[in-house]
Image: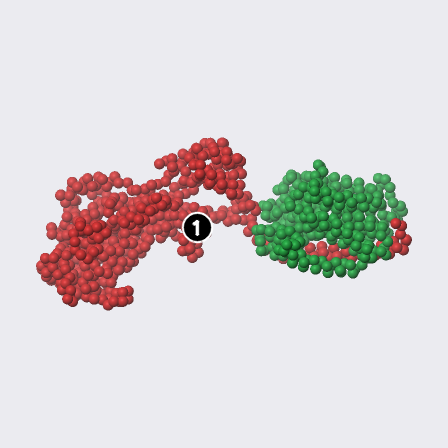
Chain colours: A green, B red
Amino acid sequence: MSYLEYTVKSVPTGLRKIFYLNWPLVLLLTAVAGTGFLMLYSVAGGGYDPWAEPQIKRFAIGLVLMIAVGLVPVWLWRNLAGVAYSVSIALLIGVEFFGSVGMGAQRWIDLGFMRLQPSELTKITLVMFLAAYYDWLPTKKTSRPFWVLLPLIFILVPTALVLKQPDLGTAILLLAAGGGLMFLAGVHWAYFATVLAAFIGLVTTVFKSRGTSWQMLQNYQFRRIDTFLDPSTDPLGAGYHITQSKIALGSGGWTGRGFMQGTQSRLNFLPEKHTDFIFTTLAEEFGFLGGVSLLTLYALIIVFCVASAVMNKDRFASLLTLGVALNFFLFFSVNMSMVMGLAPVVGVPLPLVSYGGSAMLVLMLAFGLVQSAHVHRPR
Amino acid sequence: MRRSRADTDASHGKLSRRAALLGGAQLLFMGGLAARMRYLQVDQADQFRLLAEENRINIRLIPPKRGEIFDRNGMQLAQNVPSYRIVIVREDAGDVEDVMARLAPLIDLTEEQQKTALAELNRSAPFLPVTIAENVSWDAVSAVSVNAPALPGVSPEVGSTRVYPRGSDFAHVVGRVGRVSQKDLDALEDPDAVLRIPRFHIGKINVEAREEALLRGTAGTKQVEVNATGRVMRELARREGQSGADLQLTLDAKLQNYVQARLAGESAAVVIIDCEKGDVVANASAPSYDPNLFIGGILSRDYDPLLNSRYRPLVNKTVQGAYPPASTFKMMTAMAAIEEGIIGADETVYCPGYLEVGGRRFHCWKRGGHGWLDLEGSLKHSCDVYYYDLALKVGIEKISAMAQRFGLGIRHDLPLSSVNSGLLPTKDWKLRQRGESWVIGDTVNASIGQGFMLASPLQLAVMTARIATGREVMPRIVKSVNGIEESVRGNRSLDMKEQNLRRMRKAMYAVVNDRRGTGYRSRIIAEGMRMAGKTGTSQVRSAIVNNNEVPWEQRDHALFVGFAPYDTPRFACAVLVEHGGGGSTVAAPIARDAMLQALYNGEPPLDAYPTADRGRIKTQQQQLRDVKPDARINKGKNQA
């Protein structure tokens, strides 16, 4: 039971809801985004152009969007979950035929004012849909094979479509987020053990498929894995990203080289320094302390989300909050692992910090759902 | 679906447990990330910092200025002159083809040159300057500068190129430089990094090559910060290098020019040495070539004739050539005999025109014989039999040992390429090298500088200087380095009886100044400038036929060695004319003319010559005075 119980016994209504938003979470999100603005200002060589300014505007829009979504009753979102999921599947199929391709990976639909990546949207709608599913499903049926197979299909359909784009990073995130949600919903341990065993088998098969007619991954995907396993084999080619990223990180030391003093990013040795590798710039310029500070902010966001979910007696709201938090966690942990050389380069941005419109808006939308769950929790 | 209160509680309890579990796992993973960050940023920080610095800092070499070379009077023999090239930076040019079209008529670019330049521009990084034309004239540079507003991205760059203003005169002394080749790099154990600079020049032969260490200097460095594409962002630090040392040579450019001109048309070599310090004042090898042609690569149109000429212009005959010294060696045979006490002051030998040794008859050049001769007479007439006789008494070992003391058979250490050590045969040598034992006939041949005996013109000049001074004159070519005089090497006494040397010199005096001497026609008649010397004619073929009747390649080599003035020797010289015929008719006049130039510092009065020659000499002097060294100095196409 929350501290609010002592003051208000019922769900707040109207604009008064604003006072019941999870304000610490809002502050944390703003702090993370602020770090992003700072880094975007730095990698532009000390200018709001071309990245910091649009990013600030987008975050402002995102903030408004988040609060707006937060004020909408959470049961409305639950009722919309099926529709939202269906729409995003439709968009994923549509983008196969009508979308544009950029950077050889993500596909988007140009909406005029922004480029919508259906795969980004799907991360949220999948969570919503699964949360709604488990809210609907009687608890005792949770671990029955049929009722396990069903959500698995809900997960695998968008995953397969995203993999087709081909966007390996997002596909893995979808799979992990979906699986995580099933775990949270209380699916039996044995299923996860089985899947783990099957996964190991699959990885072996995928590697065996290399060079054969039934090759299961693109050649560049194989090369990325090779490079990840041993970046030094190709320091100027495919391993360049990881090698340079590690150099930038490592040269930061305890306190970094100073704001706008990072030679690796300023002299363009870092690839994609304003998007996927922005954490490297942060770590180079503000050192270990700067990196750990951001990591702490992220950790606090996770902690606040988990706390909010645990306090919430509503099953949909709780699962939704945890799902969003899990997604967020997967986002930044995959990105950080990547730039630290712990994971292959898969093209996952650092949430709220990397430059990019659709990822930022979708994330703020998701935190809007978290806010909605928080505001409308049963008291 | 409405749930029961119990169901809700149970499911929420399970959800909370799993949420805590998953949340805990997430925090654990973040802890792992922090640990990894700590490992990279704290534990390995130094290593990565170093790698980051390596990434960003490039060390660029600043090529040092090469030392220049001067003659003994300060006349420039090798100099650095600015050379201009036109470069284009693509990113500054904008429309490269448009700019090229406007640039082409200004600097006379052919269609083909434009095409290759455009291809290179499109290939290289946009910020890198691409050379469009090299060695362009100052006029072209001005034209480009004046039209700069219409030629964005185009700029003239100044470099330095080596020029030899004395052209062919000093090719065989100063030598030349050229682009560093892979062969040059392979030859060095630890090549200086500066050699890898494009367009860097290294000494290829002679002084330029042998004094490379002095001339090159040391490179300066500048540290520049570059970005990932290699663009220079700024200069961080600069350390100036050290220019190469300027060398002053012992040679006299005016004399050298005269001698080279005097040798025109011959395949010949002349060395003139200052007796006092061993300074080589002239070192001429004809024909010569223009070293300027080699700078920046010689065309085969120019190179093939040099390579294929039978006169071998690329060979420095003064030190690389080894020839039978012939009669010029007779002084050595005589000195060996005198020092051994074998010939007394008035002792005479009878020359019947031949000497029978071991059943074989060795002829004197004069079939009829010279009759009774003393030392002076024998040298004056260049009688062979006299020396056959001496050699048989002294033996080859003592003759060779004596010759070595006079500088034959040893490699004089001069900064020239391929200095030949000549050959002084001994019994040991023949057994070792040929596997045959020495026979008496070898001694007979050696006594008159034939057979196995070989000497370079430089060695003969040194020998003559040593006879003239009685000291161990060591030749040298470098007079001073950066204005600091080089010490004179050797110059100790030869440790021979002065009266014996005097006797030798007197005989040599007779060779040139006695009416019946072989060099009489080439005497100097100015008092106090008289020359002493010895002619030589070294046989190339065995049969004795008149020189004019055989092809050039089979004619005898003409030799002359001499010193002057007789009383107080200042200069010693050696002249060799390949296949020139007789020493007295061909080599001696050259020696006399060259020595007079040296003695009178380029202005010999006509009355130093014998009366009969004066008319001919006058015209010759006028002709030679105006001969400019053959030098094609590339100052650009428009400035021809």
In screen coordinates, is A339 left or right of A16? left
Relative height, residue A267 to residue B438 (above, below): above
Residue B193 in the image: state x and y as whole percent. Answer: 46, 52
**Amino acid under disc 1:** Leu
Residue B69 or residue A158, whichever sits in front: A158
Residue B455 or residue A136, whichever sits in front: A136
From this viewpoint, is residue B621 visible?
Answer: yes
**Residue drawn at 53 percent across, 38 percent down:** B91
Relative height, residue B371 to residue A34 (above, below): below
Mark 1 Cα shell of 10 Å, populated few (<14), some (14-19), many (≥20): many
Q: Residue furthest front?
A: A213
In screen coordinates, is B134 left or right of A233? left
**Residue drawn at 87 percent across, 53 percent down:** B8
Residue B120 in the image: state x and y as whole percent. Answer: 49, 42
Q: How many marks?
A: 1
In screen coordinates, is B304 left or right of A155? left
Residue B574 in the image: state x and y as whole percent. Answer: 23, 52
Q: Residue furthest left?
A: B371
Relative height, residue B136 to residue A254 (above, below): above
Asked which quadrant contains residue A97, the reply is top right
Q: Quadrant of the C terminus of chain B?
A: top left
Q: Disc 1 is attached to a residue of which chain? A: B
From this viewpoint, is residue B386 visible?
Answer: no
Residue B390 in the image: state x and y as whole percent. Answer: 16, 63
| Label 1 residue SS | helix
**Residue drawn at 11 percent across, 52 percent down:** B516
The residue to which callout 1 is attached is B195
**Residue drawn at 79 percent across, 60 percent down:** A189
Residue A203 or residue A2, whichever sits in front: A203
